Amino acid sequence: MTLKIHIDDSAAPYEQVRAQIAEQAHAGELPVGYRLPTVRSLAESLGLAANTVAKAYRALETDGVIETRGRNGTFVAAAGPAAEREAAAAAQAYAERVVRLGLSEEQGAAAVREALRAAYRA
């Protein structure tokens, strides 16, 4: 994730943060499930106050661009219809499980392909 704040810009810094994250999420540069930096970490890296970044994150969450999962962090949310969001959440959970099991990306993908083939044949 790359953000640049322009102090001489007419847009407020929080709005610049909000707009850039939203644009990157909608363009797919920040994929669904991408974990965003903490408010404090991002604020430090951009030279902004933590409250400025927190305000941007709150606006993004209100817009459905990101979601906060308590102490687990803040992530790019699934966009689109509810079914697509549910599928993205299930895929994210599956991917995390595959990693915990120590399987390769190809092994995980192969399992999904086989499960989809079986489900669509039924």
Image (cartoon, rainbow, N blue to C red):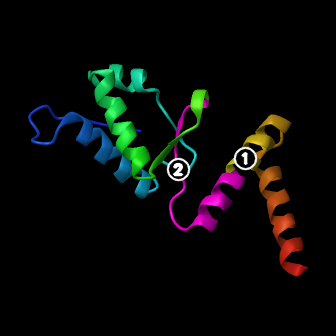
76 in magenta: yes
Q: Which residues are magenta?
A: 72-91
Disc with the residue nearer the chain's start (2 vs 1): 2
Q: Position of residue 23 (x, y in %)?
A: 35, 53
Crowd around label 1: few <14 · some 14–19 · many ≥20 (10 Å) = few
User: 58 or 77, which lies in front?
Assistant: 58
Question: As rendered, which of 116 and 102 lies closer to the eye?
Answer: 116
Q: Is residue 82 magenta?
A: yes
Q: Residue furthest bottom?
A: 121
Where is residue 77? Give x, y as percent: 52, 50
Looking at the picture, which amino acid does disc 1 mark?
Ala
- How far across and how far down the image is residue 26, in percent? 41, 57
**Residue at 66 percent of width and 52 percent of height:** 89
Left/right of residue 12 with respect to residue 39 in the rendered view = left
Q: What is the C-alpha distance between the residues marked 2 and 1?
A: 13 Å
Q: Mark 1 sits on what residue? A: 93
The secondary element bearing badge 1 is classed as helix
Q: Which residue is mark 2?
A: 77
**Viewed as shown, does residue 101 lie left or right of 3?**
right
For the residue pair 107 and 115, the one nearer the viewer reads as 115
